Image: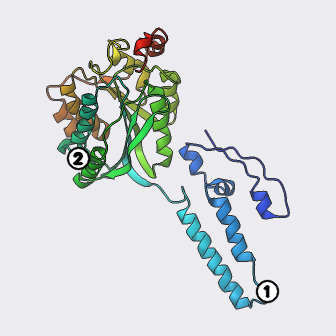
Amino acid sequence: MSSISARPIRSKSPVSATSRFMTRRTSSRAADRSGGPRDLLQKPGFEPGFCLFKQVVFAYPRGMSALSRARHLLSGCAALALMLWLMPGSRADEPVDVELVLAVDVSLSMSADELEIQRHGYAAALTHDNVLQAIADGAHGKIAVTYVEWAGTTWQRVIVPWTVIANRADAERVVAQLSAQPPNSARRTSISGALEFGSDLFAESGYEGTKRVIDISGDGPNNQGAPVNLTRDGVVRQGIVINGLPLMTRGGLSGAYDVNDLDRYYSDCVIGGPGAFMIPVNDWTQFPEAIRRKLVLELAGPASPQWAAEEADHPPVVLTQDKPAADCQIGEKMWRNRNWMLDSR
């Protein structure tokens, strides 16, 4: 979505003319970087600061000498330069190899033990030698990562904000943030809501990744919010890759909303983008290893020695399919036909 602005109304007062610019929020990276004069006026925080700048520079006290006016003008220009530097989006984004959103399911279908297993699994993977080597081997030698927990359409929580990982110390700082607060469960399962939330995070990351990836895990189909396949398509059109980790386990409030072929559902309805893939988990003992394998493939690629080491004695990952076979509305249909005694999931 691009910024939309109305034509400014001509006015003798620059302040009143500027104030008539109308803007809409956008998550488009291109819109944030268009850089034209009108786009500058639309940047958050610019207009109030610009008005203040004009008051400082042009409101000369009576009787001020030419030298004093020059000093006054220079001070105002310095203030404007500082304002522009501090303004959101005014500085160039830091280059990284991958911008990675880790989106983790915490719906009530997950038991307390399973929530802890997820946290520990990600913590172990991020500090594993193979993952750290995959990061170091990148062109920039660093990635930017954020960790998000999600459930229903309105329940997404950023546990770890955007953080650079370039070495073990960085990874351990992320792990410390993961351990700082316990996970909390919430109602419903909105994969589409998680994808929308995750895609919006890239616009405010402050990093410029060669690749942008949403890494989503969950143990059930979408049952709330927009159709997941349509949301997936919209996210992929932004140049974002979606990889998946379908959790085909049994725990929490299971049974009523379980999908036996969740791996096919993820393959056909959730993952997408160039080289998108998923790794199914059939038992919680496989989870830490699956997370590590997925991170190595996302960061290093299939031609890397780290990936070759990970794939020894393992089945291949499942790549995205061209022709969907799964019912992408199965979760919504199951919810409509639900047993009202089991409506929390």
Residue farthest toward the left in the current orientation of the protein: 313
Relative to 48, is 227 above or below? above
Identify the residue at horizontal 82%, vertical 53% (top origin): 9
Residue 79 visible (yes or no) = yes
Picture coordinates of residue 306 (x, y %)?
A: 20, 39
Location of residue 100 by image quarter: top left
Considering only order in the chain, which callout, 2 or 1, is on the residue closer to the N terminus?
Answer: 1
Q: Secondary structure at mark 2?
A: helix
Please report the residue visible at 57 percent of the width from the left and 50 percent of the height from the top: 32
Q: CA distance from mark 1 to mark 2?
A: 64 Å
Q: Amino acid at mark 2?
A: Leu
Number of labelled discs?
Answer: 2
Q: Which residue is mark 1?
A: 62
Q: Give percent across and percent down for residue 142.
A: 32, 51
The residue tagged with tag 1: helix, strand or loop?
loop
Instruction: Please state if 270 lies on the left or on the right of 181 as rendered.
Output: right
Q: Quadrant of residue 284?
A: top left
* Image depth: mark 1 or mark 2 in front: 1
Quarter in which the N terminus is drawn: top right
